[in-house]
Image: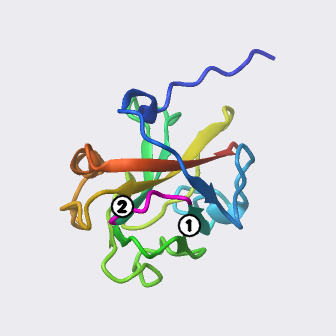
Amino acid sequence: MAEQKYPPLQYDFMPPVPSFTLVSNDIKEGEKMPLAQASGLFGVEGGTDTSPHLRWEGAPPETKSYAVTCFDPDAPTGSGFWHWGVFNIPADVTELPTGAGSQDGSKLPKGAIQIRNDANVPGFVGAAPPPGRTHRYVFAVHALDVETTGVDENATNALAGFLMYGHVIARALLTATYSR
């Protein structure tokens, strides 16, 4: 079997920043995500579009807020696929529970803003790659030097990334996979 070739991650082309630790009770680095993190919305039988638990530590003390994103760089769109974006997470928050990415955002910390994903719904949309190739799902926690990014619930993922640019002082990554 030929080795799969993957596009580089967008973070490889951004200014380098220190890293910190990101872990989850639900997903593991380099391993296939459970069915709960797959997309029933996109036809994965048994998928529930449930965002995974995320916990982070070791961010710089000057962190004023966090943003959490999930991106599939391997989606056959020419621009990847954004599965989740949460912004303006207060600096004293270092964990999101399983299901925090529900469409109503009721499990998010006070003040956090959740934008629409590339399925055009608010919250987390799970994995649903076309059959065959294994896709990567890059969960990122961005430590920011501002309390608010200017992102509101109507922002696109590209605009949210632009508004974060220059304010990311550290980043933690956790990459899980999924295939059908």
Element marked by disc 1: loop
66 within the magenta span = no
Residue 133 shown left or right of residue 58 in the figure: right
| Mark 1 → mark 2, Cα distance in angstroms | 27 Å
The answer to whether residue 46 is left or right of residue 169 is right
Q: Which mark is residue 51?
A: 1
Choose top left, top right, bottom left or bottom right for residue 67. bottom left
Upstream in sequence: badge 1 or badge 2: 1
Regarding residue 85, the answer to whether it shows in the image is no
Q: How dense is the environment of label 2, judged by Cα within 10 Å: few (below 14), some, or many (20 and up)?
A: few
The spot of residue 6 in percent (x, y) is 58, 24
Q: Quadrant of residue 177?
A: top right
Q: Residue at x 37, y 49 (%)?
A: 169
For the point 33% across and 61% down, the residue is 116
Residue at the spot of label 2: 62
Residue 80 on image: x %, y %: 43, 37
- Please give the name of the residue rendered at 36% of the width and 67% of the height, measured from the top-left corner: 122
Which quarter shows the N terminus? Answer: top right
Q: Disc 2 on helix, strand or loop?
A: loop
Q: For the stretch drawn in magenta, what is the main secondary structure? A: loop
Q: Residue furthest left?
A: 150
For residue 103, above or below residue 22: below
Among all residues in the image, which is located at the extreme right? 1
Which residues lie in the magenta part?
A: 58-64
Residue 170: give x, y in percent of width and height. 43, 49
User: Residue flagged by tag 2: what amino acid is it?
Assistant: Glu
Near mark 1 (Cα within 10 A), the count class, few <14, some 14-19 or many ≥20, is many
